Image (tube, rainbow, N blue to C red):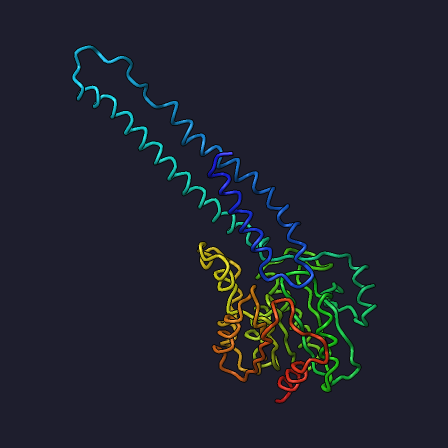
Amino acid sequence: MPPFLGVFFFASVYVKSQTAWLMMSGGNRWRLYVFIRRFYQFRAVYLAVLSGIFYKLSFGSLLLRPRRQGRHPQGLTTRCIRNVEQKPVRRETVQRISGQIAVSVLVVMGILVMFATLQRQLIYYPTVESEAELLRAAAGTGLLDWRDENDQLIGWRSHSGNGDANRIVVFHGNAGYALHREYYVTGFLAQKQDWDVYLFEYPGYGARSGKPSEAGIKAAAAKAVKLLLGSDARPVYLAGESLGSGVASHLASLFPEQVGGMLLVTPFTSLPDVAAQHYKFLPVRTLLSERYDSVAALSHYHGPVAFLLAGSDDIVPPALGLRLHDSYAGPKWLYIEARAGHNSLTFYPQADWWREVSKFLTAR
């Protein structure tokens, strides 16, 4: 394999593996293997194209190089011989350097194209399961299925039996599926305030059809919240975890008067800001079409927002959550678990922050 192809291969594997690590929820990092395997399908295409380019620029140009002159005619001076020999050497050197520069540029462009065209596969890591299997698992935790007006499964819900209970919708991170976030149900139900907890499922996750994208997730989430708001006059509270914090922030901007409050767990300012922390050598702010701009979204909302950050988060740096917190002008509450990582926050129901968040959100 030519050296530049080896460099491209290892750089591509690095980008793929690091992004697979990015923002994954606990217990799902084993899925990295699956997505590296996917990468090999695309690697073959890129390597084939670049091999052809390398042949054209390097070996192909050799066939066009002029032959060196043979024995020099008798009687030529030393200076004349030197000039005759140097001209083709200089031309060959220019061709070789130009070819190397062109190939290097094409390698970089190939990496950029790969990043841009595969970004949704690099961002979303859904776990897919049959509806029957999920229904059995939900029954074991006491959760009911949440369906839309067409009887399509869109998530899971608890049922307090209290018609005046506070309703909160949870939007999970980029990996797994909604039923993996059952700890939000146990956490809120353990508080003094009555809660009905809804775990929303993204398109393409769990048993839901479709493919995940920012536009598709936001549209489906807005439809689900609108469905809840239409059922009665109670406000709806929102909770967003990691990627879900961008979804929750967007919904708060759409329904600023009907959203009673929000809990944002390991949130970020925008997805390009997160990517820029991990890929400083790539123009990710330009390449990423998936934005999840929470700063812009929260500028249209003025209700209470609780921020829960992991102080040792190496996936979504806590500095981004702090920046989002500082930019928010409404009532806010902040808690930083100093030693926690992105996937190791304390979620057991007896944690003090559950009580403080529940009280803060319902104080109005």
Nearest the eye: 362 or 339: 339
- Residue lying furthest top in this view? 74
Q: Quadrant of residue 26?
A: bottom right
- Residue lying furthest front in this view? 78
**Which residue shows up at 53% across the image and 47% down it?**
12
**Which residue shows up at 63% across the image and 46% down it?**
38
**Which residue shows up at 74% across the image and 64% down it?**
153
Nearest the eye: 38 or 202: 38
Q: As displayed, is residue 59 above or below residue 119?
A: above
Q: Quadrant of residue 102?
A: top left
Q: As displayed, is residue 305 above or below residue 290?
A: below
Residue 312 image offset from top left, x and y in percent: 57, 69
Residue 171 image offset from top left, x and y in percent: 65, 69
Q: As displayed, is residue 276 above or below residue 158?
A: above
Tell me the quarter of the image containing the C terminus: bottom right
For the image, the number of numbered tags is: 0
**Which residue shows up at 65% across the image and 63% down it?**
25
- Residue lying furthest bottom in this view? 364
Q: As displayed, is residue 255 above or below residue 56?
A: below
Q: In this rendering, would 173 be left or right of 190?
A: left
Residue 80 image offset from top left, x and y in percent: 18, 20
Q: In this rendering, would 242 be left or right of 274?
A: right
Residue 168 image offset from top left, x and y in percent: 68, 77
Nearest the eye: 182 or 25: 25
